[in-house]
Structures are given as C-alpha cells and as structure tokens.
Image: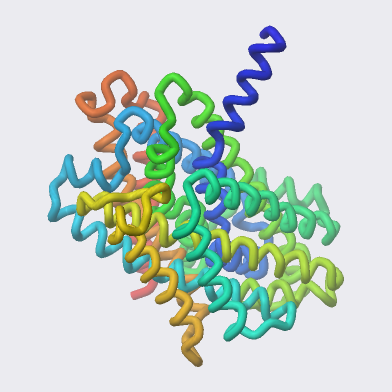
C-alpha cells in the first residue's frame, strides 16, 4: 500500500471512529465494574473464561447494529416500529425505560461511591456530576460530545494498571482462562447472566445504531466503522479481564467479601497499596460519569425514534424538546434517587445487570429479524456464521434465565 494511501486510510479511521469505541467502553459502567468486581471476589478466576465467548458475541451483535445503521440510515427503534408496529415498540420502550432507569441510578451510585473514597460527600458529587453530564450534552454538538467521550475511554487504563500492580500468577491466570469451569448452581448462573448482561447490554444496540446514523457514515466507509466496533469490543473485555483479575488475586485469595465496587477499591489498600485503591476509585468515577451521559441518551434515542420525534445532539432544544426533555428527566431522576437516604444501592446496581441479561434475547431477536430482511438490508444481510452466533447467544441467554428461575423457586 502506497504511503499516501496508508495515511489516508489511517486518517479516515480516526475521523470515523467513535460510535463503536464509545459504546463498548461505556459498557464498563458502575454496574459493570461492580459485577466484574463481585465475579473476581466471589469466584476468583473461575468465570474469566466466559469473557472470550462474550467478546465474540458482542463483536457480532455490535457489527449487525452498525451495519443496519449505515445501510438504512435509521435507528434501531425506528426500524422496529416500521417493521413490527407501534404497539410492539411501545411495550419495548416501557421495558427498556425501566431497565435503563435502574442502570442510570446505578451510575450515579458509582459516582457517589467513588468520590467518597476521595473524601467528597454524595450531596456534593452527585448534583455536580448530574449538571456536568446534562450541560455537556444539551449545550454541545455531536462532534464535541463525541470527543469528550473518547477522552473518557482513555482513563479505563487505570484498571489495567491496577491489574498489573497486584502482581498476579500469570500461569494460573492462563490456566483458568483456557480451561472453562461452570457448575449449574444458582449463584454461578446468576453471575454468568450478569456478566453477559453488563457486557452486551440491550441499551448499547440502540445507542450504537443511533450514533452511527447521527455521525452520517456512508456504506463506502463502513469498513472503518466496523473496525471501530471490533477494536472497542476487544478493549472493553481487556478492561473487564483486569478488573476481575485484580479482585481475584487480592480479595478472593484472602477470603474478603465485598458487595460494591467501592468495597473492592477500599479492600485493595492493605493488600496492594493505596495507589491501587485510588486507581480503582478513579476508574469507577470516570466510568460512572461516562455512562451517566450515554445511558440516558440511549433511552432517549429509543423512545423518540419509536414515537417518530426529532432526535439528535446537533438539534437545538427548541427543535427537539421531547429529546432533551426525556434526557433531562432521566439525568435528574437518576441523580435524585441516589440522594434519597437508605436506598438499597447494591441490589439496584447488581440486579440491573442481571435484568439486562434477561432482556437481551428479546432485543436480539428483533435485530436478527431486521438484519435478515432482504428488502431492508439488500445485499447486506447476515451470513450463516453471524446468524449462528447471534441465535446461539439469544437461545443460551433464554436457557440460562430459565435455569436461574427454576433454581430460584
């Protein structure tokens, strides 16, 4: 490849990157970090093998949504309404709003927990963070907001550094990674559903496709957007791996029980030093702020597309009042709930991820029916391998949910 063509290719990638990288990384939100921390602290490295098939499934699902956005120029909720009708879309919107509200609350809980480690009370950190994320989206443009989100992605390196600082036994790590273990016990099945739900959250598909459409990526440049999706999906799993690793090599080995990511950060101090604690807490605050911006946006795109209202960060408030109104409601409602005394944050943060895993198969079935519609996708429908992986993911999650419900009775 000539040097000029190489630099043009690299330049186009950096110009078109964003949706895939942002969507995948924001998946490591407060609920996600809590779930990974609990997985490492309670099960050690026993479930770390699951990150490999989850990563493959995430790449396939994200690629399908990105491809639909490029080919059709429409968001996922918009396509579901056109294909399956307003009634189905309405019930989907209700279910996703309730699920995402739990996720939004958990992210402000993450801000509160992380900042408390630095000595800042939640009555200061939560209102300030809510205003910050609201102002950035309402007053910004798509380009400026995307740049801010991409900067936030860089700070996930703090978890990789933390994982290295705990000095793991790498031979044991690779042994656990390459030799899957799973007992069909309620606790393990619940955690596995939570790991899938927090890594392939239903809201991600709506946000990714909407942001692809808003960025205006054309079919001739889709290969760069696809690469963006793949790189983002790999990075999010590297971060998840190091969170599980850090907690497994310290908390699990020392029999320390934790209930939140904050507990995990504080428990690292006597075992791995104060710098590990601060790095872990910093990552939690960054991830929570990042996700507190994106999750309400995803829900807003979903609802406004489904009802045929104007959407887009580039729109002014007066041009899209419903879009900004719903976004503002989710931000301030999520922050307000956290300020309420004695609210059970731990169940909200963890079980919101488990619910994500239970809801995922239904969203995935909609995606598969749309992506294989030749009238809609023309020559860009799925191949047999993508269909197999996506359908297998949906059926496995339905199976795990049924097993979980059976064991819980």
Percent x, y for residue 65? 38, 38
In the image: residue 271, left or right of residue 215 = right
Residue found at the very far bottom of the displayed protein: 341
In the image: residue 305, left or right of residue 1 = left
In the image: residue 118, left or right of residue 17 = right
Residue at image position (41%, 57%) is: 297
Percent x, y for residue 337? 44, 82
**Vertical comparison of 106 with 240: above or below:** below
Residue at image position (38%, 38%) is: 213
Quarter of the image with the N terminus is top right
Residue at image position (29%, 51%) is: 362
**Vertical comparison of 96 with 20: above or below:** below
Pick the front one: 178 or 259: 259
In the image: residue 396, left or right of residue 7 = left
**Vertical comparison of 409 with 388: above or below:** below
Quarter of the image with the C terminus is bottom left
Q: In which quarter of the image is residue 326?
A: bottom left
Q: In which quarter of the image is residue 390?
A: top left
Residue 183 visible in image: no
Pick the front one: 307 or 104: 307
Percent x, y for residue 291? 52, 60
């Amino acid at each position: 490849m000539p040097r000029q063509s190489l630099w043009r290719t690299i330049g186009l990638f950096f110009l078109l990157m964003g949706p895939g990288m942002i969507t995948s990384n924001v998946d490591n939100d407060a609920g996600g970090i809590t779930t990974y921390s609990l997985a490492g602290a309670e099960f050690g490295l026993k479930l770390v093998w699951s990150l490999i098939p989850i990563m493959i499934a995430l790449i396939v699902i994200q690629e399908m949504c990105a491809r639909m956005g490029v080919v059709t120029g429409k968001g996922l909720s918009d396509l579901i309404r056109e294909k399956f009708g307003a009634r189905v879309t309405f019930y989907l919107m209700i279910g996703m709003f309730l699920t995402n509200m739990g996720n939004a609350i958990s992210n402000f809980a993450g801000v509160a927990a992380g900042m408390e480690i630095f000595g800042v009370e939640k009555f200061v950190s939560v209102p300030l963070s809510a205003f910050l994320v609201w102002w950035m989206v309402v007053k910004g443009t798509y380009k400026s907001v995307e740049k801010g989100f991409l900067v936030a992605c860089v700070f996930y390196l703090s978890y990789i550094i933390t994982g290295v600082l705990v000095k793991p036994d790498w031979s044991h790590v690779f042994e656990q990674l390459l030799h899957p273990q799973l007992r069909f016990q309620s606790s393990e099945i619940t955690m596995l559903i939570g790991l899938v739900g927090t890594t392939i959250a239903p809201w991600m598909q709506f946000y990714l496709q909407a942001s692809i459409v808003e960025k205006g990526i054309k079919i001739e440049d889709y290969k760069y957007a696809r690469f963006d999706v793949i790189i983002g999906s790999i990075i999010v799993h590297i971060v998840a791996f190091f969170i599980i690793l850090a907690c497994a090599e310290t908390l699990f080995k020392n029999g320390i029980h934790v209930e939140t990511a904050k507990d995990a950060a504080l428990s690292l101090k006597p075992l791995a030093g104060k710098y590990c604690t601060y790095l872990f807490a910093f990552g939690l605050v960054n991830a929570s702020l990042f996700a507190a911006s994106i999750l309400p946006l995803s829900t807003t795109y979903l609802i406004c597309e489904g009802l045929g209202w104007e959407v887009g960060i580039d729109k002014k408030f007066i041009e899209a009042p419903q879009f900004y109104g719903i976004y503002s409601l989710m931000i301030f409602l999520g922050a307000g709930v956290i300020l309420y005394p004695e609210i059970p944050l731990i169940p909200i943060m963890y079980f919101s991820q488990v619910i994500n895993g239970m809801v995922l198969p239904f969203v995935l079935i909609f995606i598969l029916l749309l992506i294989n519609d030749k009238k809609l996708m023309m020559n860009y429908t799925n191949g047999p391998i993508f269909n197999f992986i996506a359908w297998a993911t949906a059926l496995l999650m339905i199976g795990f949910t049924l097993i979980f419900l059976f064991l819980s009775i």
